[in-house]
Amino acid sequence: MTAQPALAGQTIFVTGATGAIAEACAVQLAQDGATLMLMARRADGLDATTARIRQAVPGAQVQGGVGDALDGDAVRAALVAAHAIAGRLDAAFATVGGGEFKPLIDHTARDLRDAFDTNVVSAFHVIAHAAPLMRPGGSIVCLSSGAAVLTFRHLAAYHIAKAALEGLVRMAADELGASGIRVNAIRPGLTRSGATQGMFDGGATPAFLPEYPLGRLAEAQDMAGAVRFLAGPESAWITGQCIAVDGGNLLRRSPNLAPLPIVNSSYRGS
């Protein structure tokens, strides 16, 4: 008798779904049997992502909805739609983030507010609107960064916002624990994606590699196992944790990217 996939019958919601990490994790979740509701700002990108997931996982149950994760009403509506698929919401993965590359003293107060909205408020909307739809055992996973812990020159607003996101994760885990809902995060190291490709192209790889004991930078697929673990029943006794998935970068330091041409640019997740 063939065993059922570990996530069979479960519904999982993903924001920023057109991002490389979100897509790689969605593929893993679908392979383990989850039904997916994906949210992103661009309809064309969302359609393409959905098609790739279905190609990678024949028979995958995937739905998509266009919306901005910074819009609380849009997030709530998408989560309600996710719950309506099978009358349950088992996990949510909040991935939207981004920030400015420039020296701290060149930042404005608006830059800090924008980074907070993008990295923290977007995740808050998921937590606040997903939790009431979840039964005990529900799991919320946020996408943090090693930059939340290691200071990162010329990435000040992002560093500050990701540190705040991890505070949100701990606070939510504490308050929602009584409802049996877990809240955790992963901290990727530098991972190849549409948002970071400029860093790879701009010469970041030689600067980063000495700070990674495992000797390479990350691909999006490297994050999928950790997210799958935190979303699934195997992590039932884990909450309030921010798990580094970074090739050992936190054992060392962040590189100095100030001389590279990527500085004075910006990015935001899907």
Image (spheres, rainbow, N blue to C red):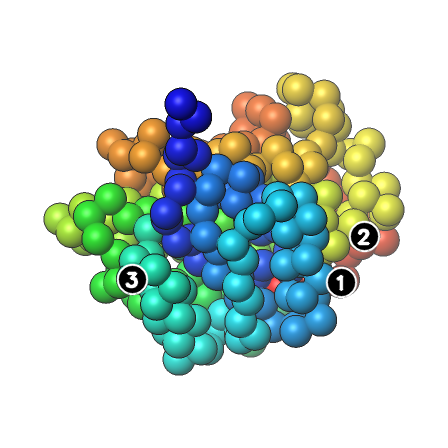
Q: Which mark is residue 6?
A: none
**For discs 3 and 1, the disc positioned in front in the rendered view:** 3
Query: Quick one: SS at disc 2?
Result: helix
Proximity of marks 2 and 1: CB atoms separated by less than 8 Å:
yes
Which x, y percent locates residue 81? 40, 70
Amino acid type at circle 2 is Gly
Give the answer, above or below, for where 15 lies relative to 176: below
Kindly identify which residue carries mark 2: 198
Near mark 2 (Cα within 10 A), the count class, few <14, some 14-19 or many ≥20, is some
Left/right of residue 49 with respect to residue 64 in the rendered view:
right
Kindly identify which residue carries mark 1: 265
Which x, y percent locates residue 209? 74, 28
* Mark 2–mark 1 distance (CA, rounded to whole Å): 9 Å
Query: Quick one: SS at disc 1?
Result: loop
Which x, y percent locates residue 207? 78, 34
Q: Is residue 99 visible?
A: no
Residue situated in front as seen by the camera: 230 or 158: 230
Which x, y percent locates residue 47? 67, 66
Kindly identify which residue carries mark 3: 87
Q: Is residue 63 visible?
A: yes
Give the answer, above or below, for where 182 lies relative to 62: above
Q: Residue at x 41, y 48 (%)?
A: 141
**For discs 2 and 1, the disc positioned in front in the rendered view:** 2
Amino acid type at circle 1 is Ser
Left/right of residue 196 with respect to residue 232 in the rendered view:
right
